[in-house]
Image: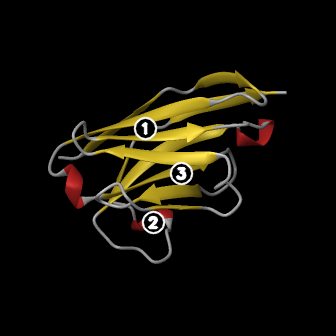
Amino acid sequence: QVRLVESGGGLVQAGGSLRLSCAFSGPVFNDYVMAWFRQVPGKEREYIGDVDRSGSLTSYAGSLQDRFLIFRDNAKNMVDLEMRRLKPEDTAVYYCAATLRDLTVPRAKDYDYWGQGTQVTVSS
């Protein structure tokens, strides 16, 4: 059984940085493409980016790619999301997700497993 657990959320001032972590347990981490999403109340879950199975290829939503970076460590079964120059509009619950599929269009419904989410609040 796959389990994802996010950590690292919290309160940060605008302009600051934060690094979130996602711990993967279960079989087999290297089989999964890993992604990060975020969600604010009343809105759909928003794709941030993903990383391929090897950790060498990342993709990002165009609006976030200059501030957000995804790192994958297959030895530790971990995926991190580094967020820089944070803005109040980045306030959301952040989720990591895993899929066995090779997606050309990253849609939340195509991800097989989700973490419980971690709250990030950016104060102005």
Amino acid carrying mark 2 in the image: Lys
Amino acid carrying mark 3 in the image: Phe
Mark 1 or mark 2: whose residue is earlier in sequence: 2
Q: 48 or 111: nearer the eye?
A: 48
Find the distance from the CA under tag 1 to the CA under tag 2: 16 Å
Residue shown at the point (48%, 62%) measured from the top left: 108
Q: Is residue 54 above or below residue 19?
A: below
Find the distance from the CA under tag 3 to the CA under tag 1: 12 Å
Find the distance from the CA under tag 2 to the CA under tag 3: 12 Å
Of the residues tagged 2 and 3, which is closer to the observer?
3
Residue 60 in percent (x, y) is at 57, 60
Mark 2 or mark 3: whose residue is earlier in sequence: 3
- Residue receiving disc 3: 37
Q: 123 or 52: nearer the eye?
A: 52
The local secondary structure at tag 2 comes to helix
- Residue receiving disc 2: 109
Residue farthest to the left, as pictured: 27
